[in-house]
Image (cartoon, rainbow, N blue to C red):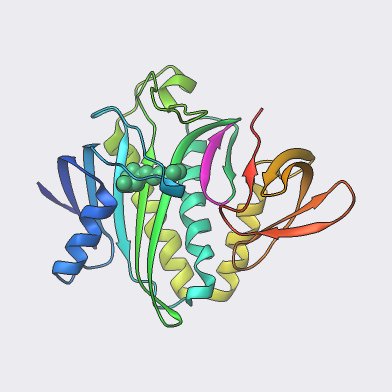
Amino acid sequence: MNQAFNNDISIIHLDEIPSTNDYLSQLCRQENVPEFQVVTAMSQTAGKGQRGNSWESEKGKNLLFSLVLHPTFIEAKEQFYLSMLIAICVSELLEQYTEDICIKWPNDIYWKDNKIAGILIENELIGKDIAQCIVGIGLNINQETFHSSAPNPISLRQISGKETDPDLILQDLLNRITNYYNELKRNSKEFKQTLSDIYLDKLYRHTGYHAYQDNNGIFTARFHHLLPDGHLCLEDEQGNVRAYAFKEVNYILS
Ligand code: BTN
């Protein structure tokens, strides 16, 4: 079913497919797909997570969707701004329902020490430009038990004790994403700073020493700063600061 939405957003609702990200990127290979084309699914048979993981979601219980952007106004080296923008929109949406929402670098959405939403952004770069950006979001809404080996999933239902309509959440989220995205397009320089400020304000383990693991083993460190390309800089107890790309460091969860 194809649903018209707002001015620019059209939504393809599907029942069961392997992955909304894969469906949308395949569609983009076949035809000219406008920005903000959205694809949702009730369930995915091969939902993709970060780091090659799979994404668990019980049929019809949660929000699973992807949308396509053509962010020609930012360079490939600035792609982390898109990641921040999406993570901020998901967090601000969830903050309407509960406290204690934060963003675990780079873009997991946490409630306390548990993951409530995941974001998978797949960019196609051409030279210095981002030709195409597929944003995939999985948000746990009404699922009550999780069976995969993911360490710490949680749903809004488990937090609030209430059912929430995934369609309402989708509409709210799409409004937020369009507003922030348009603002980034209009006012790129200033809004980039705003995004960085909001992101840091919501960052999980922003203060204090915590356990991490890199390829040298487990160590204790605190957040130091974030580089413009999204590298995470941690300072260990000896005062050494090291920059990590995604996948180079793991958080040890309590
Ligand atoms: C993560 O590992 O945190 C990212 C999870 C992203 C899951 C969503 S669900 C909708 C979209 N389609 C996919 O196959 N993955 C993303």
Q: The C terminus appears in which quarter of the rendering?
A: top right
The residues colored magenta run 106-112
* Count of numbered tags: 0
**Which residue is found at the position 45% from the left and 20% from the top?**
158
Q: Closer to the camera, 135 or 246?
A: 246
**Which residue is found at the position 47% from the left and 76% from the top?**
74
Q: Quadrant of residue 26?
A: bottom left
135 relative to 203 in the view: left or right: left
172 relative to 103 in the view: left or right: left
If the picture is divided into quarters, which one holds ligand 1? top left
Q: Closer to the camera, 101 or 54?
A: 54
Q: Closer to the camera, 48 or 10?
A: 48
**Which residue is found at the position 60% from the left and 30% from the top?**
113
Q: Is residue 40 above or below residue 242?
A: above
Where does residue 209 sit, x and y in percent of width and height? 80, 40
Where does residue 28 sit, x and y in percent of width and height? 21, 66
Give the residue furthest to the right: 238
Q: Is residue 115 above or below residue 66?
A: above
Where does residue 77 sit, x and y in percent of width and height? 53, 74
Q: Is residue 88 above or below residue 140?
A: below
Residue 160 magenta-highlighted: no
